[in-house]
Image (cartoon, grey):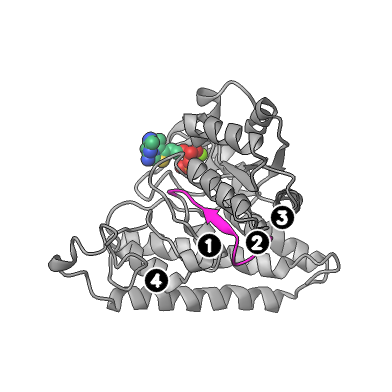
Amino acid sequence: MGATGLDLLGMYRCMVRIRTFEEHILTEWRAGEVPGEVHLYSGEEAVAAGVIANLRVDDYVVSTHRGHGHVLAKGGDPARMMAEVFGRTGGYCRGKGGTMHMADATLGILGTNGIVGASLPIATGVGLYCQYMATDRVSVCFFGDGASNRGTFHESLDLASIWKLPVIYVCENNYYGMATSVEEHMNINDIAERAASYGIPGVVVDGNDVVAVHDAAAEAIIRARSGGGTTLIECKTWRHHGHFTADPAYYRDPDVHNEHLQRDPIIRCGALLLSQGLATKEALDAVHNEAIAEMNAAVEFSKNSPWPEEDELLVGLYAE
Ligand SMILES: Cc1ncc(C[n+]2csc(CCOP(=O)(O)OP(=O)(O)O)c2C)c(N)n1
Ligand SMILES: [Mg+2]
């Protein structure tokens, strides 16, 4: 814990665990072990780590198709997550949901989600629940720049602003919705500008600076808990890989891509920890080695976990 009370090393560990989890998946996907496509979160770790460091276990997170980082940061079990990606019975949905259907209600993780923009109305409803039940819990909604053009974004922010709901809308602006750049899909520079339409605070932060993300989220979450209503936080970030595992992302200018890679959130946070004397090089190496061991074990667990049987196909599909 640093002098400011900020657990910088904890956030570093969180980011390294997410990166390692994702890179293990990429390796296994390339080896043909992972069915389907996976939307990797590598490069965007500071958003999940910085925001979720402010949350309690009983707060809620509603995630996206690029959601492994949110789930891990909120306490998700990497072995059960990995097994779900592998399609095995050890996974969160016994292998039938895959990467975009991971949830653990006991940890307030209300699901990764295959429908772009669907996290917004879900998180808004959860915010209404938190308020109606007179709790001081908050609902955090992650979504992308592309999703901010859906009607669900506007409907949700409108309702949440009118009712002063304890929802924090966190836009992960990685400058692309699939192969479409923000210049092609919106006519403004900052998505946070849209907050003005709803009379709520709109904040732009460097989404690769975990401290900046943490501090912006802390302010919004404290306000939401105390009845002050909703905030839109736009985190400018960059995905290291293509839209999903099979996408080589040829549509991105290699020079621009390389510039963004220089702003890697993990490298920046590591440098800060060292320069502030908050960690030694050995301590940072240990964080990486522990993450590698943890994710190796998750892969091993997944490979040893049985495939679902055919007669399980309809089990758990409908509420009894
Ligand atoms: C309603 C809906 N429309 C289209 C898609 C196909 N799709 C999947 S991801 C994606 C782009 C999303 O972009 P963004 O919101 O910026 O998130 P990012 O992938 O960049 O994290 C699209 C169009 C979908 N899954 N759901
Ligand atoms: Mg995007």
- What kind of secondary structure does the magenta stretch mostly adopt? loop
Identify which residue is drawn at 71% across, 34% down: 200
Identify which residue is drawn at 68% across, 58% down: 136
Task: For label 4, count other residues whose C-alpha is less than 10 Å away and answer few (under 14), some (14-19) or many (20+).
Answer: many
For residue 67, above or below residue 53: above
Q: Nearer the viewer, residue 319 or 65?
A: 319
Residues under labels 4 and 2: Cα distance? 22 Å
Residue 158, quarter of picture: top right
Residues under labels 3 and 2: Cα distance? 11 Å
Percent x, y of residue 183: 55, 25
For residue 298, above or below residue 183: below
Identify which residue is drawn at 39% across, 67% down: 82
Residue 63 forms part of the magenta stretch: yes
Disc sitting over residue 214 in the figure: 3
Residues under labels 4 and 1: Cα distance? 16 Å
Identify which residue is drawn at 28% across, 76% down: 305
Disc sitting over residue 80 in the figure: 4
Percent x, y of residue 175: 55, 36
Are the residues at dot 4 and dot 1 in contact (C-beta closer than 8 Å)?
no
Q: Give the mark nearest the N terminus, 1 or 2.
A: 2
- Badge 3 marks a residue whose secondary structure is helix
Residue 176 forms part of the magenta stretch: no
Q: Give the mark nearest the N terminus, 1 or 3.
A: 1
Are the residues at dot 3 and dot 2 in contact (C-beta closer than 8 Å)?
no
- Badge 1 marks a residue whose secondary structure is loop
Q: Give the mark nearest the N terminus, 4 or 1.
A: 4
